[in-house]
Amino acid sequence: MGKVYAEISMSLDGFVAGPDPTLEHPLGEGGEELHEWVYGLATWRERHGLEGGEENADSKLVAERLAATGAVVMGRRMFSGGQGPWEDDPNADGWWGDEPPFRVPVFVLTHHAREPQQKDGGTTFTFVTDGVGPAIEQAIAGAGGRDVQVAGGAMVIQQALCAGVVHELLIHVAPVLLGGGTALLEGLTEADVRLGPAQVTPSPRAVHLSYPIASA
Amino acid sequence: MGKVYAEISMSLDGFVAGPDPTLEHPLGEGGEELHEWVYGLATWRERHGLEGGEENADSKLVAERLAATGAVVMGRRMFSGGQGPWEDDPNADGWWGDEPPFRVPVFVLTHHAREPQQKDGGTTFTFVTDGVGPAIEQAIAGAGGRDVQVAGGAMVIQQALCAGVVHELLIHVAPVLLGGGTALLEGLTEADVRLGPAQVTPSPRAVHLSYPIASA
């Protein structure tokens, strides 16, 4: 089997979403700046059905990860687009459209059981109600030997780290200060997670830090 | 004149000191781990009157900075060793001993006026009571054309950043989670500080991130 890695973009002050998220701005005030580094990349654009884009250190990293990843685990808010209507309506759709960019099995953590969804382009959404451990187990089984990405949000990554089932923490540090919001690593200590030395991919847009998890 | 840079070690979750600082552990619970990367270096050991030590990417960076720096600005707690007795007794000494490692003029921010102190090895402590701006101005004047380091703590660095007088923010990100304590960038937003793209020096012990301050 492949490895399990958690991947997310974070501000230099440690937030993965800004303050005051709304339906229009699910990432909160300033939160979209966290992902500025990725929007222009050829690899990202191709996944979203767009042409063109940049080829650089960032796109190389993204392309390698996409190729290596066989399944994704995410929380219900990431599926539904933040504080979206789905939280009140378990039958509402996600916000990823008819052809989501994942193109692999996606396992969504939720308290509401619902039927799996098959989307165009290879993405399936399977809803898991018994916690992050079982979700990751299902993702490993569905990844065809490739890696499993724990894609967020912060709470899902924290739960996965604390469960000791994550081998690598990949953080894209954006040169941004949000001043508040959702802290990625809120309250975690060495008792929960021991990090190994970082492997670093620098780029002008973001610093990519990959930490092996010594406690996994 | 040289540039003004703020330099400090930070945990991956954004803290420059851990929770519950005491006289014995002024950096709080786990806080000393932030500086593990520096203790073994030849350059650090030489400054502290010790022989031997490692020569690597970390020591090269430290040596270059020490050579380029002509004055230091710090807060009263850094001078006195955290929650030390000096806060109650304005005549008490600092905790840096008779031959402090700075070997340049040091300007200490405080509310208590006191006489300058001349130490062995070239360090002088001058006490500044009218705020971070004037302290940095005095440091520039005393730096002999070299750079000025704003060495901490967090509050002094925040004040200096907000005053718009810092050209560079140099953070040593230690692979450590403290789970609480003193947040380096607490509450700062893009309205206070705009960061440019980071220059990165990776090492197995810490990731050194140098951000130009676009708003300075």
Image (cartoon, coloured by chain):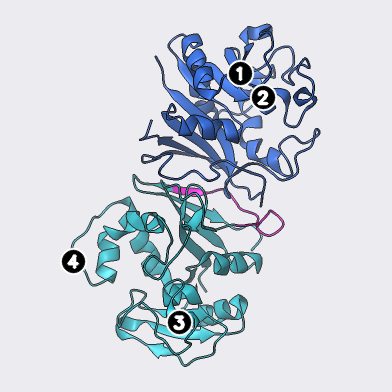
Chain colours: A cyan, B blue
Secondary structure found at label 2: helix
Q: Is residue A171 left or right of residue B95?
A: left
Residue A194 among magenta residues: yes
The quarter of the picture where the N terminus of chain B appears is: top left
Q: What residue type is labelled 3?
A: Trp
Residue B129's disc is 1
- Residue lying at 59% horizontally and 57% vertically, measured from the top left: A185
Predominant SS along the magenta part: loop
Look at the image and give the residue range highlighted in magenta. A186-200
Identity of the residue drawn at 26% across and 57% down = A40
Q: What residue type is labelled 4?
A: Glu
Is B122 covered by the magenta stretch?
no
> Mark 2, chain letter?
B
Closer to the eye: label 3 or 4: 3
Task: Using the numbered discs, state the Cα–Cα distance from disc 2 to disc 4 in whole angstroms.
Answer: 56 Å
Task: Tell me the residue at 50%/71% (across/down).
Answer: A2
Which one is in front, A69 or B110? B110
Q: What element carries label 1?
A: loop
CB of mark 2 within 8 Å of CB of mark 3?
A: no
Q: Mark 2 points at which residue?
A: B76
In the rendered image of this protein, does residue A207 appear above or below residue B101? below
Q: Which amino acid does label 2 sit on?
A: Arg
Q: Residues within 10 Å of mark 1 (few under 14, many from 20)?
A: some
Horizontally, residue A58 falls left or right of residue A8, namely left
